[in-house]
Image (cartoon, helix red, strand yellow):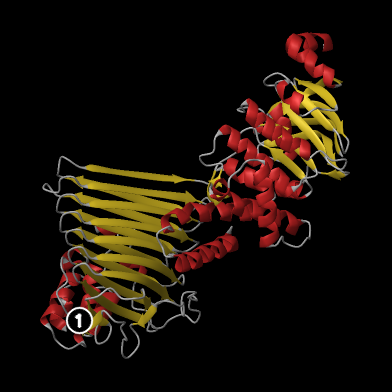
Amino acid sequence: MAALKDLFKNPTAAELQLTERFAGLPENPQRTRNFEAFAKTGLPHRRVEAWKYSDLRNALKELPAELSADAPASAFSGLGGVSEIHLTDGQVKLPKGLKLVSDENVSALGGAEDIPVAALSAALASNRQALLIDVTESPDAPLHIVFDAKTASAFERISFRIREGVSLDVFETHTRAGGFSNVVIEYSLEKGAALSRHMYQAANVDAVQLICAIVHLEAEAKLEQSCLGFGAKLCRNETRVFHRGEGASANMNAAYLVGDGFHNDLTSLVRHSKGGCDTEQLVKGAIMDGGRAVFQGKFYVAKNAQKTAAEMSHNALILENGGEVNAKPELEIYADDVECAHGNTVGALDDDALFYIRQRGVPAKEARALLTEAFIAEALEAVPNAQREIMKDEARSWLTARL
Amino acid sequence: MLKIENLVATVGEGEDAKEIIKGLTLDVPAGEVHAIMGPNGAGKSTLSYVLTGRDGYEVTGGSAELNGADILDMEPEERAAKGLFLSFQYPVEIPGVPVMTFVRTALNAQRKLRGEEEVSAAEFLKKSRAVAAKLKLTPEMLKRPVNVGFSGGEKKRLEIFQMMMLEPKFLILDETDSGLDIDALKTVSDGVNELRDPERGMLVITHYQRLLDHIQPDKVHVLANGRIITSGGPELALRLEKEGYDGVLSEAV
């Protein structure tokens, strides 16, 4: 324990508590490696470049003792036509085509040093909260993974290996009633495999919620991803995509609505390492007074990744004075025959459109909600119908309650 | 029906405020169609925005009543619920909101403000199909976002579609003929004429006499420098077309 503590420079109360938790787990070299990777940075703060808009150290001074009483309701539970899995259940039941390889997943986490909080999750996720799943056949129904741990601190890890040519449809719901949660999800797609991954995130204003997904795409593999998020006291939803084979493609969209006291951080890194890979990213969101949205998107194109086509766009609406948006789109390109672009806009609702709608009899508040909902809905078009309708309902009631 | 008395209104705020409507008086009784003609900058569009309550326009004097109710203190949506409809010179794009959703939302919002029941989905669909057919609007067009990617003529037809669906009591048509070819002008005018009704009033704002061949007014008013400077029958529009505004303006001074 003493030696572990020494891994940190001036550990905070929260870091000491995390160290204690780690010390209580059975010894394992992979776990230790992950914890050491975390300890290098500790809980990242403003002076760590990748976290300069999201000060985790400050938001998580110590581990919370308990959850809040009022959990955000999930309108998605019990939705028909999906196989629902909860990590909190004693035994995870998987549909045909999926095989549980391990429920004590301690496999190596690639690039752990660059992603300290994912490394932390991999170090602390233990028995039945760390799954390694083999996907050998495309399942009949989409998988709904429910992340709603009922403990004040939660560390969860799921890794999927999606075999050659297999398709997996996943819907993730991340809901938290306060507390601290840290989830790492890995999807490794073999040649020609396809992943459709859609997410819904909602939490109370006192929750600290970290979600990090690492997606590896071999040749011709396809990722289709979207997310609707409402943020938390601090929510960081990070996606790292690695194009590792030729002709892989990723389409990753997100929508956010951030209210007073909430912080929503969408960070992504897409590394194009082989030629002929495509990436398209559309992020749209709206914020209220006292809300903060962070968008950090980076496309990296290696020297030999010729014919890369990558486009990133982020458009934010500031619905009230006092809302804050930090956007950092980045392109880092070493190949010379590529088509890459990014666009970023921050604006207000169109007064002409508002007046037009009101002239037709729609009250100002509803007119604003209608325009905002339509604005963010563009980023949710790839979500399957049933889930998209629920998302739109959630967005609408959120907007009508606030505008 | 619509009674405007000695209306004075400014555009802009604070020191930049500029008086555009300077003591305008106008009375359009139910069942009548009145045309307002006037040169550029006379205040035609400003009048339509002041009457419908757009932000940035301030009434500094006079009154405007619709069926005896003072409309100037109402929010734009309340005026709409009272039956006031503006057909925009430049209809605005509403990205992401399909026409059918938009019109149904508007209709139900108006009904709610008036304390009426919502329209049923079946009833709405039936009516919208009939109206769309009349205006040569295809079902595909009604699924598209409002005005997005519509041609000038399609936008104006869509304004008439909304008019026929919402059945307002009083219509203001702001330069409805702009951007229309002859065929579209006829379709649009037919739509407007179908809405002529002893209970309904209309104010047709236009630059050219052309539209008035299709929508025949009971009265024509000439608006210049923020006031009605002369009024007459349909023959006044013909005279304006022949002599231009200059002749009529110099006479009025």
Residue at numbered disc 1: A105
Three-letter amino acid code of the residue under disc 1? Asn
On the image, the x and y values in percent for residue A281 come to 33, 52
- Establish if A32 lies above or below A91: above
On the image, the x and y values in percent for residue A74 come to 47, 75
Question: Relative to B133, is A225 on the left or the right?
Answer: left
Res B25 visible: yes
Image quarter (top left, top right, bottom left or bottom right) of the N terminus of chain A: bottom left
* Residue A198 in which image quadrant: bottom left
Question: Relative to A135, is A108 on the left or the right?
Answer: left
Q: Residue at x 40, y 73 (%)?
A: A173
Res B16 visible: no
On the image, the x and y values in percent for residue A129 come to 28, 83
Question: Relative to A31, is A53 on the left or the right?
Answer: right
Q: Residue at x 47, y 68 (%)?
A: A386
**Which of the pair A347/B171 is nearer the observer?**
B171
**Which of the pair B12/B232 is nearer the observer?**
B232
SS for tag 1? Answer: loop
Chain letter of the residue beneath label 1 in the structure image: A
Total marks shown come to 1
The 10 Å Cα crowd at callout 1, few under 14, some 14 to 19, many 20 or more, is many
Q: Residue at x 79, y 48 (%)?
A: B82
- Establish if A305 lies above or below B29: below
Residue most toward the bottom? A90
Image quarter (top left, top right, bottom left or bottom right) of the C terminus of chain A: bottom right
**Which of the pair A16/A366 is nearer the observer?**
A366
**Which of the pair A2/B60 is nearer the observer?**
B60
On the image, the x and y values in percent for residue A188 come to 20, 68
